[in-house]
Amino acid sequence: MNIEFLRTFILLEELKSFSKLANILKTSQSTLSHRISQIESDYGDIKLINRTTRKFELTEEGTIFLEYAKGIIELYDKSKEKLAQFSDKITEDIIISASTLPGSHILPKFIAQFGEQYPHANFKIMINNSEHSLDLITKNQVDFAGIGSYMGYKEENFEAIKIGEENLKFICSPNHELAKKNKSISFKELLKFPFISREKGSGTRDIFEHNFLENNKLEIKLAMDNNDSIISAISESNYVSVLSETIAQKAVNANLITFLEIEEYPTITSRDIFFIKPKNKALSILKKKFWDTLSK
């Protein structure tokens, strides 16, 4: 019996979707199906999932097995944690869901440093927007999350470490009419051009809409779900947008986009970046060490 197959089964029941779980674990639905089939085979070809209906549902055997699977996982994790004190080679998976700025620009350096000291820590970072990351951590499907906004979730339900702060900047193509003025522009001039927004659920969009009250005057023509797509679209058009200064800087250096300075708003808005976990959640050995490392 593969212990990770049991984890797959438990997560699958929580999500009630092979496709959603495959997306989270970055694997194929056929791989997940094989894991479930292997469990069913190990227990005498029972059926854990009713495959004759469109709606995901467990069979009677699946419902019974679910409770035992949870118990097995709990005992396994507790035994591993207890015995870890006798070994310096304990291996742990540390799963993090983070938005682009913390996931691609802030956390990697800490992970690399931690990995040198604890080589048996296996990190997996999933890049999701803040809303999706918060959803995953509240469902206990990831260990930690890196976010730029709480997206309406109650902050008191989480423990948080501030790992950075960031400014938002207006951007456009270097060939844009606004960029050729070689000076700061008025907000009224900016409003003449179509605007590209991040998708709903994005921390950048949430902070921008809540903190920059003039945002409702912008003519939003497109919404895109990642920063690279926005940069690509901006570099070849007369659109304008708003991005994290850190994320946009490489594209500015490569002359793909340029920053716009607004006369009335020298600072658009700023935000803090947080690394979070559910409040009072107990952490296993390496997870706690990583949390404590970031705390310092």
Image (cartoon, helix red, strand yellow):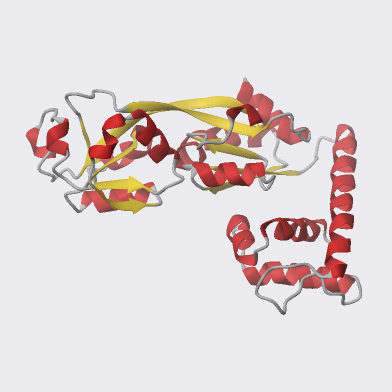
Give the residue drawn at x 71%, y 56%: 14
Give the residue drawn at x 63%, y 27%: 156
Give the residue drawn at x 51%, y 48%: 128
Q: In this view, does 10 lie to the left or right of 179?
A: right
| Farthest top residue in view | 296
Q: In this view, does 93 lie above or below 268?
A: below
Residue 95 seen by the camera? no
Q: Is residue 225 left or right of residue 45?
A: left
Q: Is residue 264 left or right of residue 107?
A: left
Give the residue drawn at x 17%, y 32%: 187
Query: How many numbered callouts?
Result: 0
| Farthest bottom residue in view | 52
Residue 287 seen by the camera? yes
Nearer to me, 152 or 23: 152
Q: Residue 182: where, in percent of width, then height?
A: 10, 31
Q: Residue 179: where, in percent of width, then height?
A: 13, 38
Q: Residue 235: where, in percent of width, then height?
A: 22, 49
Nearer to me, 111 or 50: 50
Q: In which quarter of the image is the C terminus?
A: top right
Q: Residue 271: where, in percent of width, then height?
A: 42, 27
Nearer to me, 154 or 77: 154
Q: Quadrant of the N terminus?
A: bottom right
Q: Is residue 13 above or below residue 94?
A: below
